[in-house]
């Protein structure tokens, strides 16, 4: 009976060593767009990659995986959007330094706050449960109000206005000079 127990433990260790320990990495952990004027937009990148800690065997395609889902979840407010450029991107434990950039945009159409999370799901080809990572998002929008005109400002006439003013001053000067000669 002891011999069977030892054999079973040995099989477990051998089978767990066959799978590489690959994890999804999504950075940064949060994106704060700050305060934007309504109608403006800012795009930031979140980087998708994987890590392989060196444990386990790299077993061909079983250690490949792909991004199966990119979405926004828990969204409150409006103006957040995400690109799907990395959906379907394949990663391999053999080249863990590979990354893909997801564009996340805040483009508010009304004043207020928008919050949510970017969620990325990564599925390994070996049948393991999907790995999910999130990035917290926040964006505040304000209505842009142009400042009132300065009552002490001197109006700028432009080229046409200056030309007309010059003609009027010239005509007044000519009339004034003509009266003095009489």
Image (cartoon, rainbow, N blue to C red):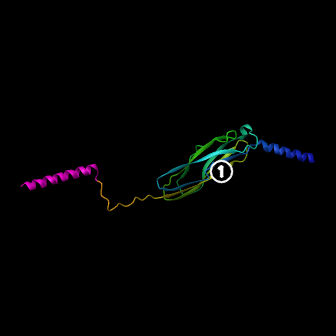
- Quadrant for residue 97, please give it: top right
Farthest residue, direction top: 60
| Kind of element beneath mark 1 | strand
Q: Residue 13: image x %, image y %?
A: 82, 45
Query: Would residue 166 be counted in the magenta stretch?
Result: yes
Q: Is residue 20 left or right of residue 154?
A: right
For residue 7, say whether it is visible: yes
Name the chief secondary structure element in magenta: helix
Farthest residue, direction right: 1
Q: Which residues are magenta?
A: 157-182
Q: Residue 122: image x %, image y %?
A: 67, 46
Q: Residue at x 63, y 49 (%)?
A: 26
For residue 88, say whether it is visible: no
Q: Residue at x 73, y 40 (%)?
A: 62
Q: Residue at x 89, y 47 (%)?
A: 5
What residue is shown with label 1? 133
Farthest residue, direction left: 182
Q: Is residue 113 left or right of residue 124?
A: left
Q: Quadrant of the C terminus?
A: bottom left
Q: Residue 113: image x %, image y %?
A: 53, 59
Farthest residue, direction bottom: 151
């Amino acid at each position: 009976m002891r011999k069977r127990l030892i054999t079973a433990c040995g099989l477990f260790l051998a089978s767990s060593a066959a799978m590489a320990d690959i994890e999804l990495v999504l950075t940064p952990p949060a994106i704060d767009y700050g305060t934007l004027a309504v109608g403006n937009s800012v795009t930031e990148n979140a980087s998708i990659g994987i890590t392989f800690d060196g444990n386990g065997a790299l077993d061909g395609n079983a250690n490949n995986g792909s991004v199966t889902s990119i979405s926004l979840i828990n969204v409150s407010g409006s103006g957040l959007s995400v690109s799907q450029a990395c959906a379907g991107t394949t990663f391999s434990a053999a080249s863990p330094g590979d990354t893909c950039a997801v564009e996340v945009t805040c483009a508010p159409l009304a004043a207020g706050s928008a919050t949510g999370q970017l969620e990325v799901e990564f599925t390994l080809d070996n049948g393991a449960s999907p790995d999910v990572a999130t990035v917290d998002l926040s964006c505040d929008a304000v209505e842009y109000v142009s400042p009132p005109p300065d009552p002490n400002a001197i109006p700028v006439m432009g080229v046409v206005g200056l030309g007309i003013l010059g003609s009027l001053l010239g005509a007044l000067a000519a009339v004034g000079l003509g009266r003095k000669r009489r």
